[in-house]
Amino acid sequence: MSSIDRLKPGQTAALLSIGGERSFRRRLMELGLLPGTPVRLVRRVAVGDLIELEVRGCHVSLRLAEAARLAVELPNG
């Protein structure tokens, strides 16, 4: 188990859980980030410490501090 902010661009992982405040978790779930969903790290953006994720064909940007709350599992364990 790792957090999504540790993935390299192009890597895909299965979302295990979302930590943080209830409103934060709820908003991400509304965007399609549900446990078991494949999530791909598209790129890292140096300005503002952002990462871009692809989830269900859509692109979502998160701050690194927010992304650290998303626990993922790589396909190979």
Image (cartoon, rainbow, N blue to C red):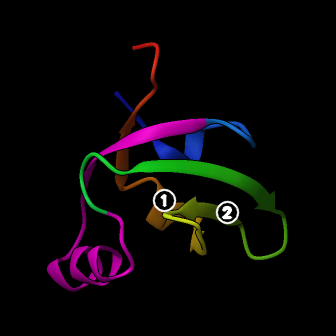
N-terminal-most mark, 1 or 2? 2
Residue 15 shown in magenta: yes
Q: In this view, does 11 lie to the left or right of 4?
A: right
Quadrant the C terminus occupies = top left
Picture layout, residue 46 above or below residue 38: below
Residue occupying the point 49% across, 64% down = 56
Position of 44 compared to 74: left or right?
right
- Numbered tag placed on residue 67 in the rendering: 1
Q: What stretch is highlighted in magenta?
A: 12-33
Q: Please state which amino acid type lies under the numbered disc 2.
A: Ile
Mark 1: amino acid: Ala
Quarter residue 64 falls in: bottom right
**Residue 42: where, in percent of width, then height?**
73, 55
- The residue furthest right is 46
Secondary structure type for disc 1:
helix
Query: Decide: marks 1, 2 in contact (CB < 8 A)?
Result: yes
The circle drawn on residue 25 is: none
Task: Name which residue lies at 58% across and 66% down.
Answer: 57
- Residue sitting at x 73%, y 41%: 10
In the rendered view, does 64 fall on the left or right side of 44? left
In this view, the residue in front, 31 or 65, is 31
Task: Label 2, secondary structure: give it.
Answer: strand
Mark sitting on residue 51 = 2
Residue drawn at x 67%, y 62% is: 51
Give neighbour class at mark 1: few <14, some 14-19, many 20+ (Cα, 10 Å). many
Q: Does the magenta stretch include residue 23?
A: yes
- The crowding category of the residue bearing disc 2, from other C-alpha atoms within 10 Å (few below 14, some 14 to 19, many at least 20), is many
